[in-house]
Amino acid sequence: MSSSPDPVTPITPPADPAQALARGIARMFGEAGQSCLFEFTLRNGRRADVIALTPTGQFTIVEIKSSVADFRSDQKWSDYLPFCDFFYFGVSESFPQNLIPDTCGLIVADAYGGVILRDAAETPLNAARRRALMLRYAQGASRRLMQQLDPGGHF
């Protein structure tokens, strides 16, 4: 008896532009062997749109800007810098890239992937902050998995 392959279910990209960018950025990092969390709350109370962890323990934060109005109204991005080794803005191809500060990395993405157009400068975290962030990341990821298995649980 032969089994036929399971039909491939097409995955519809998110309608929300910011979610579509986050998905493409996560795919890009995933292809590079990194794991990502979305809407990750940092110790200072700020919420990173995307935080990625490399196999060597480095952290990258990506601030997604889905429109010029979003970029101009939100200037808190510098609050993320003490919590990552690399910082990028993630934008769509139609976003005016000249608005992004030269001191920041730049990723252009869509719902299917992304590309780094400008590398971020490395600003290594100190050991104590890296350890605290690693624990927060691991616990956050674990809670999200637990919530998927038991949506009514209190995690």
Image: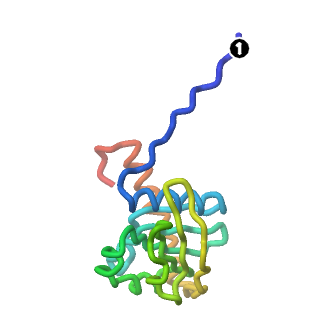
Between 72 and 81, the one lying in front of the other is 72
In the rendered image of this protein, does residue 143 appear above or below residue 117? above
Between 56 and 78, the one lying in front of the other is 78
Where residue 55 sits, quadrant-wise, is bottom right
Residue drawn 29% across the image and 52% down it: 154
Q: Quadrant of the N terminus?
A: top right
Q: Position of residue 70 (x, y in %)?
A: 32, 74
Locate residue 42 relative to residue 109 in the image: left or right. left
Residue drawn 44% across the image and 72% down it: 95
Residue drawn 39% across the image and 67% down it: 66
Between 81 and 129, the one lying in front of the other is 81
Q: Position of residue 127 (x, y in %)?
A: 57, 84
Q: Quadrant of the C terminus?
A: bottom left
In the rendered image of this protein, does residue 93 appear above or below residue 11? below
Q: Position of residue 119 (x, y in %)?
A: 61, 80
Residue pushed farthest right?
A: 1
Residue under circle 1? 2
Where residue 5 sits, quadrant-wise, is top right
Q: How is the image coloured?
A: rainbow
Locate residue 76 relative to residue 142 in the image: left or right. left
How many other residues sit within 10 Å of disc 1, few (<14), some (14-19) or many (≥20)? few
Residue pushed farthest top?
A: 1
Residue drawn 55% across the image and 85% down it: 125
Locate residue 150 relative to residue 21 in the image: left or right. left
Residue type at mark 1: give it. Ser
Disc 1 element: loop
Q: Position of residue 81 (x, y in %)?
A: 46, 85
